[in-house]
Image: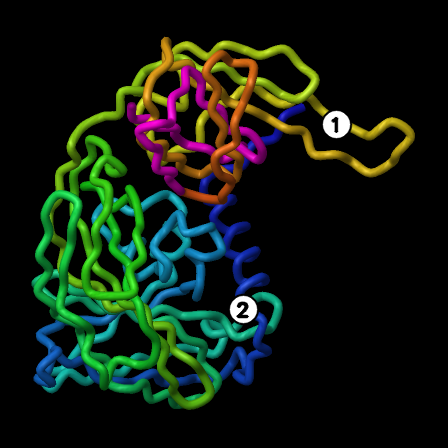
Amino acid sequence: MIYTMSARTVALLTLVFLSAVVACQPSQIDSQDQLTIAGKLLRQDGSPAPVGEVVLAPGFGGFGELLGGTFFTLISAGLVCLADSPPELCEVFRERAQTGEVRADGSFSLAARGSDTRTFFGNARPLTLTARLPEGQVIPAIFRVQTLQLELPELRFWEPEVKAGSGRVEWEALPDSGYGEGDGYQVLFEDGEGRQVWQFRSGGTQLAYDPRIVEDTRGGQTVVAQRKDVAPGTTLELAYRSAQVLFRGEGPPPSRGLPCSYQEEGSQPVTLDPSPLTHRDLFSAARLPDPRPGPLVEPGGTDPVPRTRSLIVDLGSVRNVSLVVLRGCSCTLAVSPDGRSWSELDSQTGDWSHPGSASLRARSVRVSGDIGLIREISIWS
């Protein structure tokens, strides 16, 4: 018998699970307590921010790292789930979010119940406070509440000028004071539906990248500065997002639409044509043939041995390989001129790319390992 769960049930289970693994601090607040969260929103120049409201909702600090960087590093219910077309997972978050009015001087105050700040397990629940300027700059602040009257530090929007062109982005630095501690930036490429196409990290205020990585997508690129600050009894994870600058990808990879073969250790390869790995769905895990039931066991042993699964893209002839992009692949990348002798090139986790070279020539490109969540293989020659 096969059991299925609704999106709402999955959302609830995900919420409980993430609360357990992320919120490990015992709550100092009783579930019956009434509490207040207050603060002030300012523009970068120190003037009151023209923000009509702030949103308080469940959130998870470091959630992006938990998912291998697939999503925005400080993903939050306030930022994602209150969009015009939120994902299904957001049903639970939207029901629990509340808004507060921002006064003319930028100050705000939100009332909450103690039960809103506690997880099912009695830990302090991460909450996300989100505000957005009319021009598009956003501040998500993630924190836990451990006092009945929490006064947040002044939150200043970051309003840099961002200049972008094909393969390059430049921006003004985050000011040294008033924005917390930390360094470095992220550049996010998101499509028109807010889904992340790619994410780059930069230690400075400019980035040079291979524009082929964003393929034929279009949308907005945003610069994000992630920092930390403190408030009574808690630490704030802050993400200062710039306004978006439009981008348009340069085109699809030559591998688009090519068939591939799929193989599990100890079984015969299966040809996938059309291939779910080369058809431009950059956001959904590919539907691969079901693995065989039960783990493999070494002869005479009792410990399960993980099965190796492989995907091979045949380029049709020996070609130069100048770039390989893998999305959602915890795997090893290898190439072969004939499909028999293989040369390993790289091994990484998540969304990653490997630059080829003028001397790298191959007919077959193989990824092997933990490929259960792989979304796309893109190859340029």
Reading the image, the residue beneath label 2 is 23
- Residue 72, quarter of the rendered image: bottom left
The answer to which quarter of the image holds residue 56 is: bottom left
Circle 2 — which element?
loop
Count residues near mark 2 (Cα–Cα under 10 Å), then give few for <14, some for 14-19, many for 20+: many
Would you say residue 168 sits in the magenta stretch?
no
Q: On the picture, is 148 further left or further right than 359? A: right
270 relative to 68, above or below = above
Residue drawn at (50%, 22%), measured in percent from left and top?
A: 311
Residue at 34% in and 63% down: 97
Residue 375 forms part of the magenta stretch = yes
Residue 144 placement (x, y as % from top left):
45, 77
- What's the residue type where badge 2 is placed? Ala
| Three-letter residue code for mark 1 | Gly
Instruction: From the viewer's side, name the closer residue of 268 and 36.
Output: 268
Q: Earlier in the sequence, mark 1 or mark 2?
A: 2
Along the line of sight, which residue is nearer the eye, 351 or 90?
A: 351
- Quarter of the image with the C terminus is top left
Q: Is residue 308 left or right of residue 153?
A: right
x, y percent for residue 80: 30, 54
Q: Residues within 10 Å of mark 1 (few under 14, many from 20)?
A: few
Chief SS of the magenta region: strand
The one of 53 and 161 positioned closer to us in this rendering: 161
The range drawn in magenta is 352-381
- Taking the spot 23% from the left edge, 33% from the top edge, the residue there is 215
For label 1, the residue is: 294
- Work out which quarter of the rendered image holds the N terminus and state it: top right
